[in-house]
Amino acid sequence: MAKPVSIEVWNPNGKYRVVSTKPMPGTRWINLLVEQDCRVEVCTQKKTILSIEDIIALIGDKCDGVIGQLTEEWGDALFSALSRAGGKAFGNMAVGYNNVDVDAATKHGVAVGNTPGVLTETTAELAASLSLAAARRIVEADEFMRAGLYDGWLPNLFVGNLLKGQTVGVIGAGRIGSAYARMMVEGFKMNLIYYDLYQATRLEKFITGYAEFLRANGEQPVKWKRAASMEEVLREADVISLHPVLDKTTYHLINKESLATMKKEAILVNCSRGPVIDEVALVEHLKHNPMFRVGLDVFEDEPYMKPGLADQKNAIIVPHIASASKWTREGMATLAALNVLGKIKGYPIWSDPNRVEPFLKEDASPPAACPSIVNAKALGLPVSKL
Ligand SMILES: NC(=O)C1=CN([C@@H]2O[C@H](COP(=O)(O)OP(=O)(O)OC[C@H]3O[C@@H](n4cnc5c(N)ncnc54)[C@H](O)[C@@H]3O)[C@@H](O)[C@H]2O)C=CC1
Ligand SMILES: O=C(O)C(=O)CO
C-alpha cells in the first residue's frame, strides 16, 4: 500500500478532479481549471522525482486527468490506474514525451498532451548561451577569477574561438533546432550545415534572404547547406548543436565513432535529451581532446552524470534548464493544464500546435480546444475549426 502523498487543494467542491504531480509556475493554469469547475490537487511532497506508487496514490479512485512531468515514467501501470479512476487525459509539462508510452495511453483511452511552441526560443537561447560560453571559455574564466588567480592581462589568457565565419551544425532542425540556427547565423554570421529527416524550408529561405541582405550591404554573405548525412555535419561544423527528438533512431547518435569524426577543436552542445549522446564515450573524448568542448543541459541518466564528466574543464554542465524562462515555464503549465481541461470538456484539438499564442494571452479566455494532443489521430479526436 503506497503512503499518502501530501497535496494542496484548490476549489474543493469542483466537479472534475485534476491532479498535478508538481507545483508549477504561475497561477493562471490553476485559475483556468478552477473557472471550469475543476478541483485541483497539487502534490507538494518534498521529493523531486515521484515513484510510480506515489503517482498511483495521487490518482486515487476518481481522477479525471493528471498533469505530470518529464521525470516520470508514464507507462502501462500509470495509464491503467488513471483509466480505472475514470481519467481521460494526461498532460506532460514538456514538448518532449519520450517518458510517455503513448501506445499504452491510447490502449487505455487516455489522451496525451505536450507543450510545443512555447519553449522554442527559450531553449534555443540556452543552446546559444552554451555555444558562446564554450567558445569563449566563460565558465573556466569565471572560476579563475573567483579563485583569485587573475594577476593581469595576458596575450594568451583564455583564448577561445571566434564564431563569425565559422560553420554551425544543427542535427534536428525542427522548431528548436531552426530557432537556434537562426540565432547563430543572424547573430554571429556563421554559415549553417544541418541534418534532418525533413527539409527545413523556412530556415533555408530565411538564411537565403539574410545572405542577400548582407551582400547588399557590402558584407560577406552567410551560406547554408542541407547535409546528406549526419557525418557530413560532424566533419564540417565547428559548433554542433543537437535538437532531435529522443527515439530509437537518435539514441547514442553521438558515440565514440561519431566523436572521432568531429574536428579536434569542435564545440558540441546538447539541449535535447541526454541519451542522444553516449556519455561514457564523451567523457573519454573530452579527456583525450582538451580543445574539444561541450555544453550540456541534459544527461544520459538524469539526475546523475557519468563518472569523470564533472572533472572535465572542457565541459560546461547545467541542470536541464533550457526551458527555464518565467514566460516559458508559465506557458508550459498553462498548455499542460489546457490539454487536460480540453479533453475533460470534450473540446476538439487545436489545428496547429505550433501556433499557441491564443492560449497564452493573460487577459483573454483561451480557445475551446486542446492545444496539442500527440495521440489525437489514434484516438480519433476531432480537429478544431477555430
Ligand atoms: N533541454 C530542454 O529543456 C528541452 C529539450 N527539448 C527536447 O528537444 C526536442 C526537440 O524539440 P522541438 O524542436 O520542439 O521538436 P521538433 O519535433 O520540432 O524537432 C525535432 C526534429 O528532429 C528531427 N529528427 C527526428 N529524428 C531524427 C534523426 N534520426 N536525425 C535527425 N533529425 C531527426 C525531426 O525531423 C524534427 O525536425 C524535444 O523532443 C525534447 O526532447 C525540448 C525543449 C526543452
Ligand atoms: O519540454 C521539454 O521537452 C523539456 O525538456 C522541458 O525543459
Image: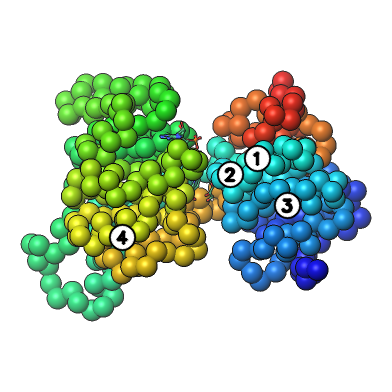
x and y, in percent, of residue 385 in the image: 72, 20
> Is label 2's Cβ within 8 Å of ligand 1?
yes
State which tag comes first along the sequence, 2 or 4: 2
Lower sequence index among marks 4 and 3: 3
**Picture quarter with the N terminus:** bottom right
Q: CA distance from mark 3 to mark 1?
A: 12 Å
What amino acid does circle 4 point to? Answer: Val
Q: Earlier in the sequence, mark 3 or mark 1?
A: 3
Q: Residue at x 73, y 64 (%)?
A: 54
Q: What kind of residue is marked 2?
A: Tyr
Label annotation for residue 102: 1
* Closer to the eye: label 2 or 4: 4
* Residues at circles 3 and 1 in contact by the CB criterion of under 8 Å: no
What's the residue type where badge 3 is placed? Leu
Picture layout, residue 308 above or below residue 29: below
Name the residue located 23 percent from the left edge and 79 percent from the top edge.
148
The residue that disc 2 covers is 97
Residue underneath mark 4: 283
CB of residue at label 1: within 8 Å of ligand 1?
Answer: no
